[in-house]
Each structure stands twice: as C-alpha cells, then as structure tokens.
Image (cartoon, rainbow, N blue to C red):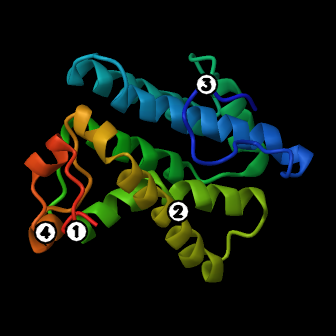
Amino acid sequence: MPVDHYENFPVASLLLPAPLRAPVEAIYVFARSADDIADEGDAPPVARLARLNDYRRELHLIEQGKATTIALFEPLARTIRDQALPMQYFRDQLDAFSQDVGKTRYRDFDELRYYCRRSADPVGRLMLCLFKAHRNELLGRSDAICTSLQLINFWQDVAIDWAKGRVYLPAADMARFGVTEQQIADGVVDDRWR
C-alpha cells in the first residue's frame, strides 16, 4: 500500500499473505485517518472531537449491520464482518485519539502506558485476529511489542510533539533525570537527557 504519511513500519507489506493485505489496509486507513484528525492540521479541538465522533457513529452503523456514510468505512465494515473483528479495539483507538485532542502531558509511566493500551495495543490484537491467533498467551506479548513501538515513536518524535504542544515523556521521569520542558524547547541533548 502506498503511504503518504511518515511511518516507522511497512503497511500491508508484500510479506503479508495476499488475503490479509486488504484487511490490514482497511485497519490502517481507519487508524491513520483518526489519528490525523486528532494530531494534524489546525482545526479547533471541538471540530476534531466532532470528527472523531463521526467515526464512532460509523462504527455503530457497522455494528448494527447498516451501510456506512463515510467512504473509508466501507472496506473497514467488510473487514470487520469478514474477519469477525472485535469492535472494542476500534473504540479504544478512538478514545485514545480523542484524549490526544486535550491531554498534552503525562504524569507518570502508568498513565502513559494506559494511553498506549488504547492507542497501540489494539493494532497488534487486531493483527492476531486476522492471523487467527487471538489467544491469551499471545495477547501480552503483542501488547508489549505494540507499546514498545508506540514509546519508540514518542522518543524519536519529541521535537515534533513539542511543536504540537505535547510532551509524551512522563513528568515523573523528567523530574527524576532533571530534564525540563525548557530543555526540550531548546533542543538541549546532554547526559541528563540521554
């Protein structure tokens, strides 16, 4: 799948079994577009939240077996139906992206981890569903990988997130290592930062 967006990972790679490429692409388009609503552009928060609520309504239509009204949801509806995907994973992502609209700081690692549980972990769980491997013994491993990837993204994008008014470094850890928001603003990389 061609991707117009900066990503750290291949999307719907040729390494995937051919029957799973379209489902992965449908899931990606949903997640990427919802995340972009929360993160990109200059729409006011109320408009961002309204658009994310439109996505919630589309999920509700899918759940009821009704036709969707936003084009990108047609392939997602087909994927959810054909693959019997749990709706909660999509709702969790929307909750996390809605949180991004208003929450710009995280008190500690547990608070940040809870965000990752809703933003990143559902992706891995959906992949397990697609591969018919959604089993308890694999869920924890998948969650650990997805949270790790989310954290890596946060750590490499500190300056990008700062420009958007967000800091995903837990405040407790910043204080523990003596790193300040001014240091982030100034781009100072020293031993405390490392």
As drawn, the label of residue 172 is: 4
Distance between the Cα atoms at labels 1 and 4? 17 Å
**Of 136 and 82, which appears nearest the observer?**
136
Q: Is the residue under label 3 in contact with that under label 1 (CB below 8 Å)?
A: no
Q: Nearer the viewer, residue 150 or 155?
A: 155
In percent of width and height, residue 176 lies at 12, 74
Quarter of the figure with the N terminus: top right
The residue under label 2 is 146
Query: Where residue 51 appears, x then y in whole percent?
Result: 38, 22
Q: Choose the circle earlier in sequence order: 1 or 3.
A: 3
Name which of mark 3 and mark 4 comes first in the sequence. 3
Horizontal relation, residue 47 to residue 64: left or right:
left
Mark 1 or 4, closer to the camera: 1
Can you tell which quarter of the image residue 139 is in?
Answer: bottom right
Q: Which residue is mark 3?
A: 4
**Label located before the other in sequence (2 or 3):** 3
Residue highlighted by disc 1: 191
**Callout 1 amino acid:** Asp
